[in-house]
Structures are given as C-alpha cells and as structure tokens.
Image (cartoon, helix red, strand yellow):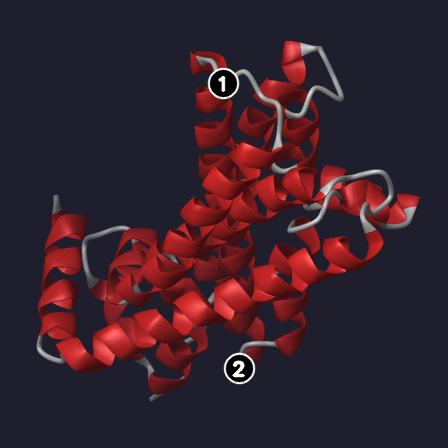
C-alpha cells in the first residue's frame, strides 16, 4: 500500500538524524510526564475531584493521551496543512490520481510522539494498580476501543481545522481550542465542568463518547455494558468530517503559487 511507502520514507528521514529524534522523543516524554505530575499533585492536595479519585482521573488521562499521541503521529499532515496551501503544494496533490486524504496523511508522520505514548502506557498501568478493576477481555477491548475512537475523533478535528484553510489560507488558532484544548479537557472526567460544556463535548464534539461514558463502565460507576460501546459512536464522527473536507476540496481555488 502506498501509505506504508510514505511511512517508510519518512522513517528513513528521521533515522538520518537519530540524536535529534531521540532528543525530541525525550522532550515529549517529560512534557507529558510533568503534565501528569500536575494531576498527581492536585489529587495529593485535595484527595478527590468532584468525587473522582486519582486512579479514575489517571485512567482517563492515559487513554486520552494515548489517543492524541496516535493522532499527532499519523494525522500531523492535517495539522500542518496550511503550509501546503500557502506554498501551492496542494495543487500538485490534487493532480495525482490518489486520495487527497491519503496523501496528506502520508505527508507528515511524527514518530517522535512515541514519547507521549510511553508515558500514557505507564500511567495506564499505574491507574490500574489504584483501581479495583477485574480486568476481563471485554474490559481490555473497551480500553482499545476508547483509544481508537479518541484517535478518530481527534483526527476528525484536525481534518476540520485543515478544511478551514480552503477559505482562509492560513490556519486559525481557534482550532487549537478543540485539538490541544480538547486533549487537556478530556484528560479529566467531563462532569467536573458545567453541564452545557459537558453536553457540547459529548453531542457536538463527542469526546465524552470515548473517555467519559466508557470510563463509567470501567470504574464500576455504571453497570450497563452499552456504555462500553459508546466509543463506536465516537468513531462515526470521522464521517461528517471527511464529508466537509471533500466539500472544501471541491470548492478549493488555487493560491496561484
């Protein structure tokens, strides 16, 4: 598949500068580690947050961070898309007999995000040690679905942000409210926020479908197994995002570069 050829070429580029790659991975690792340290100190000082324990919040943090790291790794091309529009490189992409989405995905793969992924796995193990969860195959599948769903949702947000560039050329900073801001918001159970805020990030931007609702099932706050299947609804978020992207592509006018 052509996408894996893209990935192979980008990996070769990274391996030419191994020290730089290692330093960036280390930086990503400690950036995420200190973010979790802030959460740990918060719970160490106050004990609980709106009734949620450190273990529950840590589980939420681990899943959201893992999902966002995967998205940043494989969908980074959409986050940097404005550069392709301004330089006119997207014009060449449209001339090629391949999907524009596939080409954008293959234009930039950030392997250095593995630093964040390592921390998320470590926090997941730590959270499991704090929680009394009788891990079964269904629980494990739920966690995997949560991560996959989160990756699709964040990828959808990246795609929407890139689509805006068809009309504005430059990317808009407010998109970061839903990308980096969405990650920071979803690292805590959504019910700690106001109701309108929780509803927005459940029914409009479905972050709650992959982090909050299945979290209730994993931690025993909800016994209905349907809560564990809500990540599947979150995955569907990518469909309208791709439809809006295709609309933007059809309306795209060359920058003339």
Q: x and y percent of residue 162 in the render? A: 49, 65
What label does residue 249 carry, if any? none
Work out whether residue 77 or residue 255 is closer to the camera in this orientation and state it: 77
User: Pointer 1 and pointer 2: residues touching (CB < 8 Å)?
Assistant: no
Q: Quadrant of the N terminus?
A: top left
What label does residue 135 carry, if any? 1
SS of the residue at dot 1? Answer: loop
Residue at x 64% of width, y 39% of height: 55
Comes first in the chain, label 1 or label 2: 1
Q: Which residue is mark 2?
A: 170
Place residue 127 in its image quadrant.
top right
Residue at x 63% of width, y 11% of height: 225
SS of the residue at dot 2? Answer: loop
Residue at x 45% of width, y 22% of height: 140
Q: Quadrant of the C terminus?
A: bottom left
Work out whether residue 255 or residue 61 is closer to the camera in this orientation and state it: 61
Place residue 109 in its image quadrant.
bottom left
Residue 183, placed above or below residue 203: below
């Amino acid at each position: 598949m052509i996408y894996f050829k893209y990935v192979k070429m980008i990996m070769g580029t990274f391996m030419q500068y191994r020290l730089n790659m290692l330093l960036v991975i280390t930086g990503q690792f400690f950036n995420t580690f200190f973010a979790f340290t802030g959460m740990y100190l918060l719970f160490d000082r106050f004990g609980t947050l709106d009734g949620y324990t450190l273990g529950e919040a840590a589980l939420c943090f681990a899943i959201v961070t893992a999902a966002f790291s995967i998205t940043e790794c494989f969908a980074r091309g959409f986050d940097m898309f404005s550069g392709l529009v301004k330089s006119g490189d997207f014009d060449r992409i449209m001339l090629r007999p391949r999907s524009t989405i596939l080409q954008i995905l293959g234009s930039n793969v950030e392997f250095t995000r593995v630093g964040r992924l390592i921390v998320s796995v470590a926090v997941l193990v730590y959270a499991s040690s704090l929680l009394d969860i009788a891990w079964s195959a269904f629980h494990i599948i739920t966690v995997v679905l949560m991560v996959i769903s989160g990756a699709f949702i964040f990828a959808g947000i990246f795609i929407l942000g890139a689509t805006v560039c068809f009309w504005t050329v430059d990317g808009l900073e407010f998109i970061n409210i839903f990308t980096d801001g969405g990650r920071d918001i979803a690292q805590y159970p959504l019910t700690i926020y106001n109701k309108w805020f929780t509803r927005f990030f459940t029914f409009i931007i479905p972050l709650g479908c992959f982090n909050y609702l299945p979290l209730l099932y994993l931690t025993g706050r909800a016994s209905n197994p349907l809560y564990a299947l809500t990540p599947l609804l979150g995955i569907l978020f990518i469909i309208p995002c791709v439809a809006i992207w295709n609309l933007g592509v059809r309306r795209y006018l060359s920058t003339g570069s």
